[in-house]
Image (cartoon, rainbow, N blue to C red):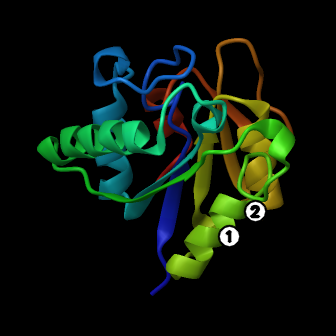
Amino acid sequence: MKKKIIYLDRDGVINEDFEYVYKISDFKFVDGVFEACKKFLDFGYEIIIVTNQSGIGRGFYTNEDFEILTNYMLEEFKKQKIDILKVYHCPHKPEENCLCRKPKNGMILKSLNDFDIDLKNSWLIGDKKSDIDCAKNGKIENKILISKNEKNCEDFLVANSLFDSLKYIKE
């Protein structure tokens, strides 16, 4: 059976977005993130994280720093009985013009290669237009922008937070 996926951006959706978050001490989960993710699982979705991490390519931190923080984040999810299916990241600078950096769909394509995914019934939730464009480029029909300033439009829905996005997502 194909998996229904909630694709989540990391910075600004799962954690508060300070520029180039790579230290555990700087990583602060957004309020309601665990409750929202538990609901997604209850609704029959699995969770994949897709995150641009150009700080690696820019030399601000290393891939190892990213992995240490990712392992910490995954452990915190596990403590809440939330299993994250996979974390995909793009370490490249924008000017490298790689295929994995959002808004391109390389991370979505990797996930389709790794898992049998039902894109029609999956969602992508992000806090930047590049996340929404990645969903479009990856043929994900259901898109939510986390923003306090935007309004729903033809292309995507808007929620104030990850927890607030539950008003759109059902079983």
Find the distance from the CA under tag 2 to the CA under tag 1.
7 Å
Farthest-out residue, front:
59
x, y percent for residue 123: 60, 54
Give the mark count: 2
- Residue 160 sits in quarter: top right
Farthest-out residue, left:
79
Q: Is residue 52 left or right of residue 130?
A: left
- Residue 52 sits in quarter: top right
Q: Is residue 164 left or right of residue 25?
A: right
Q: Residue at x 54, y 22 (%)?
A: 20
x, y percent for residue 41: 33, 56
Q: Is residue 26 left or right of residue 157?
A: left
Q: Residue at x 82, y 58 (%)?
A: 137
Seen in the picture, residue 71 relative to 54 is either above or below; the reply is below
Amino acid type of the residue tagged 1 in the rendering: Leu
Q: Secondary structure at mark 1?
A: helix
* Earlier residue among tags 2 and 1: 1
Q: Which residue is mark 2?
A: 138
- For label 1, count other residues whose C-alpha is less than 10 Å away and answer few (under 14), some (14-19) or many (20+): some
Mark in front: 2 vs 1 = 1
Farthest-out residue, bottom:
1
x, y percent for residue 63: 47, 44
Amino acid type of the residue tagged 2 in the rendering: Gly
- For label 2, count other residues whose C-alpha is less than 10 Å away and answer few (under 14), some (14-19) or many (20+): some
x, y percent for residue 61: 49, 30
Q: Residue at x 60, y 66 (%)?
A: 121
Q: Which residue is mark 1?
A: 109
Q: Nearer the viewer, residue 96 or 69?
A: 96
Q: Residue at x 79, y 46 (%)?
A: 103
Seen in the picture, residue 65 relative to 45 is either above or below; the reply is above
Give the quadrant of the C terminus: bottom left
Say whether marks 2 and 1 touch (CB < 8 Å): yes
